[in-house]
Image (tube, rainbow, N blue to C red):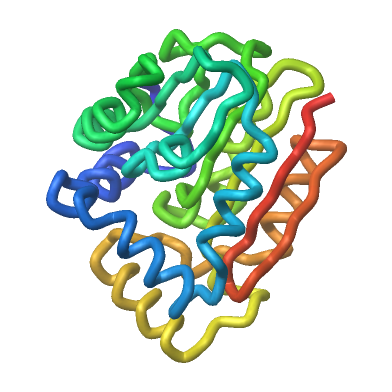
Amino acid sequence: MAENTAIRYEDVLAGAANYKRSVLNRYDRVLYVNCRFFWRCDRGELLRRYQAAVGARHLEIGVGSGYCPAHTLFPTPEPEITLVDLNPQTLDFASRRLAHLRPRRVLANALDPIEEAGVPTRHFDSVAINLLLHCIPGDIKAKAAVLGNAAAAVKPGGKVVGSTVLAQGVPVTPAGRFLMRQLNAKGIFHNTEDRRDDLESVLGKYFADYQLVVRGCMAMFTATVQ
């Protein structure tokens, strides 16, 4: 995999390595607690927005525990699902959880051009990049390649759905700020410079049509590819 010029591959790999099986086993519960009590965003809204966007050919970039696709009704009984992640442990975990969907697994850096990993461009009905950007080192503008890859993967008329925890330009509670500092100190989060206006700027760069909604310090977006 080629190294992104703005962000060191080693730093991205170190962040991804935090998601071991022991963490993934309790990830769904942690997601519920963090969203509700720290980020002040209903986890159910993340899922509803995801459900509204997914299509029959779906690409999941940054798979985590596979929570969203595991709780989603796809528009066809046999969707084509591709999972992309830099961490083989998350790929293993999510693939087992989604075994009934027979997903394709791709080990790749979300910052690198997707075609380098053998993922086709202009192919998918939908792409999801949920809760990924705040885990990647650098500010939002440095992470923009992830959104570029998502835009490149979707066929015209397709959807890109995503979410991320922001630190700047959004309301953050004292409890949220405390947890954010802890997660950044541990290298699990890298979002101290992630700003709402930067996210809007990058979304506008890649998508002519997008919606951005902020709940607490969680930004959720859905974009349509022209």
**Position of residue 131 in the picture relative to residue 104 (left or right):** right
Is residue 58 shown above or below 170?
above
Name which residue lies at 62% across and 81% down. 171
- Of residues 10 and 42, the one nearer the viewer is 42
Measuring from the top left, give residue 223's x and y in whole percent: 75, 39
Percent of width and height locating residue 174: 46, 91
Vertically, is 101 above or below 8?
A: above
Residue 4 lies, with reference to residue 39, above or below; the image says above
Q: Nearer the viewer, residue 104 or 135?
A: 104
Looking at the image, residue 78 sits to the left or right of residue 21; the answer is: right
Specify the quadrant that holds the N terminus: top left
Above/below status of 164 relative to 70: below
Left or right of 104: which side holds 141?
right
| Residue at the image point whose x is 55% and y is 58% from the top | 44
Work out whether residue 153 can be spotted: no
Left or right of residue 105: residue 120: right
Q: Position of residue 71 (x, y in %)?
A: 46, 41
> Which picture quadrant has residue 166?
bottom right
- Residue 96's quadrant in the figure? top left
